[in-house]
């Protein structure tokens, strides 16, 4: 929405931008092994997480870090969608992955043990929106 991250003071709407009442959409793909995966998220005024088009979890609190469970029916690449809501005040977005021992790491931090997360080019995102995920998963298996 035209937000200047370096503006000082950050809450001055006089320059034409607004730092409140907006949403953030994160679209990517995540590579998961078959089985249970524990993830979480935090955004200033709420977050919704979908994997493979299935809602994994949501919260609507400005100070809550949520934990959700997703069971991948088979090993493959799944669409990942995170929607963050900003109503007022600060704004930050983080998605997490929980290791088997309960350690929380940033989603996509492969070196620390998270599954890989890919941000595809826009054409692939559009394909996923039209059911192309099954084709992507078939291609991955070969």
Image: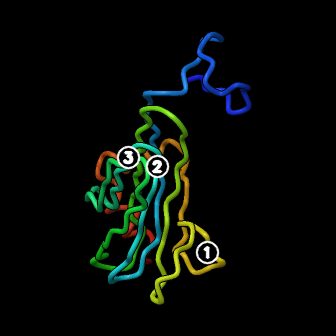
Q: Position of residue 5 (x, y in %)?
A: 68, 33
Residue contact at pointers 1 and 2, CB within 8 angstroms = no
Provide the residue designation for mark 1: 110
Colour treatment of the image: rainbow
| Residue 102 image offset from top left, x and y in percent | 46, 83
Give the secondary structure at mark 3: loop
- How crowded is the residue under tag 3: few (<14 C-alpha within 10 Å), some, or many (20+)? many
Quadrant assignment, res 113 = bottom right
In the rendered image, residue 25, in percent from the top left (x then y), is placed at 45, 42
Judge the density around disc 2: few (<14), some (14-19), many (≥20) Cα neighbours within 10 Å: many
Residue picked out by circle 3? 46
Disc ID at residue 91? none
The residue that label 2 is drawn on is 43
Which label's residue is closer to the chain start, 3 or 1? 3
Q: Residue at x 33, y 56 (%)?
A: 50
Q: Residue at x 59, y 15 (%)?
A: 13
Mark whose residue sits in front, 3 or 1:
3
CA gap, disc 3 to disc 2?
5 Å
Helix, strand, or loop for circle 2? strand
């Amino acid at each position: 929405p035209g937000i200047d991250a370096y503006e000082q003071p950050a809450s001055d709407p006089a320059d034409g931008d607004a730092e409140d009442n907006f949403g953030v959409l994160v679209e990517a793909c995540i590579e998961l092994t078959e089985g249970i995966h524990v993830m979480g998220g935090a955004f200033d005024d709420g977050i919704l997480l979908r994997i493979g088009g299935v809602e994994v979890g949501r919260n609507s609190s400005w100070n809550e870090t949520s934990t959700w469970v997703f069971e991948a029916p088979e090993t493959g690449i799944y669409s990942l969608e995170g929607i963050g809501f900003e109503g007022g005040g600060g704004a930050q977005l983080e998605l997490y992955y929980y290791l088997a021992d309960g350690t929380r790491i940033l989603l996509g931090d492969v070196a620390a043990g998270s599954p890989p997360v890919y941000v595809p080019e826009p054409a692939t995102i559009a394909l996923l929106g039209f059911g192309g995920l099954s084709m992507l998963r078939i291609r991955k298996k070969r």
